[in-house]
Image: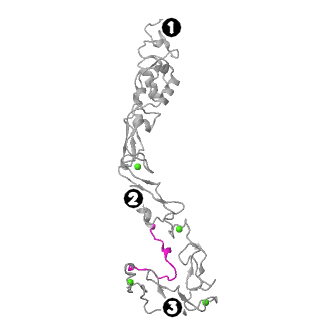
Amino acid sequence: MASPLAQIRSGSILISLVSSLVAVSGCASGDAESESFGGFSTSAGNNTEDDDDSSDEIGSEGEDATSTDTSEETTSTDTSGEESTSGEESTSGEESTDDSENCGNGVIDDGEVCDGDALDDQDCLSQGFDSGTLACADDCTAFDASACESEACGNGAIDGGELCDGSNLGGANCVGQGYDAGTLACVEGCNAFDESACTYTCGNNQIGGDEVCDGSALDGETCATQGFSGGSLACTADCSGFDTSGCSSCGNGVIDAGEVCDGNQSCATVDPDTYSTGTATCSSCTSLNTGSCTSGTCCTSGSAGTCDVDAILDCVCALDSYCCDNNWDSICVDEATDDCGAAC
Ligand SMILES: [Ca+2]
Ligand SMILES: [Ca+2]
Ligand SMILES: [Ca+2]
Ligand SMILES: [Ca+2]
């Protein structure tokens, strides 16, 4: 609130107790102030304790925010890096080993069931079928019996090498084949499952099929591997890709998630209702120091209405129309500081 003392204009000499008795001349500007009250005139400025209040830091983490504290979360987020165990193909459940680089050399190496034409002396007959040509699966981990024929195929019973027969799937289903849901079927030749109606579910936190990621399952990716310096990586709702909106990079000039600032800013952009001059300095993207920001011309005496921060100008002139109608004097400056939030 404006002190009545503040209503005494600088340069005027006014002693209210005697003003009714003695008209003191020389109050050139003071006479215009009809709102003046009968307070004692001392000095105009009693605003000393307010000087420092406006120069505090925004985002006050201060010293513990010196380094990018986002780094630790990136390392811990993806511990669920179980790759999709669901991705195994087709019929035989044998897992592949790391000898896959030897698959295709025509020699049955350790961990391989067969390799190309090398079938370990097996054929369709030995696999329980009646005719046809046995092959090796592309990954060398199983035989490919899809060209083998069974005379008993179609009788509804699983005979010989048959994996299934019609609706008889031998208890197999899509989930058992590594999918999340769907309906498993048997191919016409009874020698393979038809997985075409099996599906993966987006949202089960397991990566399957074409999914790039699923919820917390990020396939080992982090904000860092995506080119950012910190933050938390997420997966898009449809599992088709990564959501980097929670990632940040201090120094890219963009205020990312978790950052207070990135680079120095003009004070006027930090808080246009308070500042008009100066530069706010950004520290480690975690704190913004506005200590050198000021309210510019609102802090100095000048002609009427010279305060260049609109919000402060409006505030002061609502309190004291003299400041806009006559002169922006030191009392207006005090009012700006004391009552209207100016940083001077
Ligand atoms: Ca081989
Ligand atoms: Ca059969
Ligand atoms: Ca999934
Ligand atoms: Ca940034």
Q: From this view, report whether residue 40 is shown above or below residue 113.
A: above
Q: Secondary structure at mark 2?
A: loop
Q: Going from the N terminus, do you reach mark 1 or mark 2 first?
A: 1
x, y percent for residue 236: 51, 60
x, y percent for residue 3: 48, 23
Task: Measure the C-alpha gap from mark 1 to mark 2.
Answer: 78 Å
Q: Which residue is identified by label 3?
A: 124
Which label lies toward us, 1 or 2?
2
Bin the neighbour count of mark 3 within 10 Å (Cα to Cα): few under 14, some 14-19, many 20 and up.
many
Q: Residue drawn 40% across and 55% down?
A: 230
Q: Residue drawn 61% across and 92% down?
A: 152
Q: Which residue is identified by label 2?
A: 224
Q: Residue drawn 49% across and 6% down?
A: 21
Q: Secondary structure at mark 1?
A: loop
Task: Measure the C-alpha gap from mark 1 to mark 3.
Answer: 125 Å
Determine which quarter of the picture holds residue 81: bottom left
x, y percent for residue 277: 39, 32
Instruction: Check residue 204 in the rendering and tell me which mark sits there, or answer none.
Output: none
- Which stretch is magenta? 80-99
Report the residue that reaches farthest toward the top.
22
